[in-house]
Amino acid sequence: MAAQAQAGSAFQRFLNHPAGPKTIHFWAPTMKWGLVIAGLSDINRPVEQLSVMQTTALTATGVIWSRYSLVIKPVNYSLFAVNVFLGATGIYQMGRLWKHQQELKEKPVTTKATDALEVGKAKVVELKDSLVHK
């Protein structure tokens, strides 16, 4: 019986905590995990389709809010965790973008034009196939 009372009181402390589920301090980080999931799903996306501006914004958000989450009262560790993951995902994507830019600089211009032409042809075939199958 004492264990139930203690567990009940632990649950009550969780519910009534200043960063508990009755506050925005709980739900905002919970919803922000969606951004982390989206960033992780972009790992499989071709680097040509990544947005430099979006990746920069998500990386900056993760880094800045990680620090802020440890300074505010009450300290919000769930906000800290989600922002560390958001920043790490963004940094990884920025590394992929940087590596891709370096590879493009090393390619001759004719190869770049040929690659662009091949991508364009593939898009036309893809569009044609999607129209045929409708």
Image: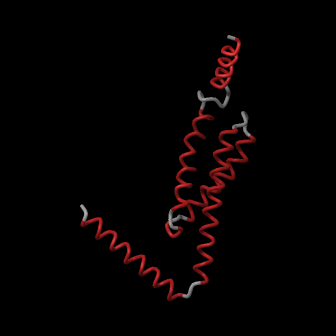
Check the image and report above or below for 22 versus 75. above
Instruction: From the viewer's side, name the closer residue of 28 and 5.
Output: 5
State the image quarter where residue 131 is shown. Answer: bottom left
In the image: residue 52, left or right of residue 7: left
In the image: residue 104, left or right of residue 70: left
- Residue 33: image location, x then y, percent: 57, 45
What quarter of the picture does the C terminus occupy? bottom left
Taking the spot 67% from the left edge, 47% from the top edge, the residue there is 65
- Residue 2: image location, x then y, percent: 71, 12
Instruction: From the viewer's side, name the closer residue of 13 and 24.
Output: 13
Q: How is the image coloured?
A: secondary structure
Taking the spot 57% from the left edge, 44% from the top edge, the residue there is 32
- Residue 90: image location, x then y, percent: 62, 58
Q: How many marks?
A: 0
State the image quarter where residue 68 is shown. Answer: top right
- Residue 107: image location, x then y, percent: 57, 84
Taking the spot 57% from the left edge, 36% from the top edge, the residue there is 27
Q: Residue furthest top?
A: 1
Check the image and report above or below for 60 versus 127. above
What quarter of the picture does the N terminus occupy? top right
Taking the spot 57% from the left edge, 79% from the top edge, the residue there is 104
Check the image and report above or below for 45 versus 79. below
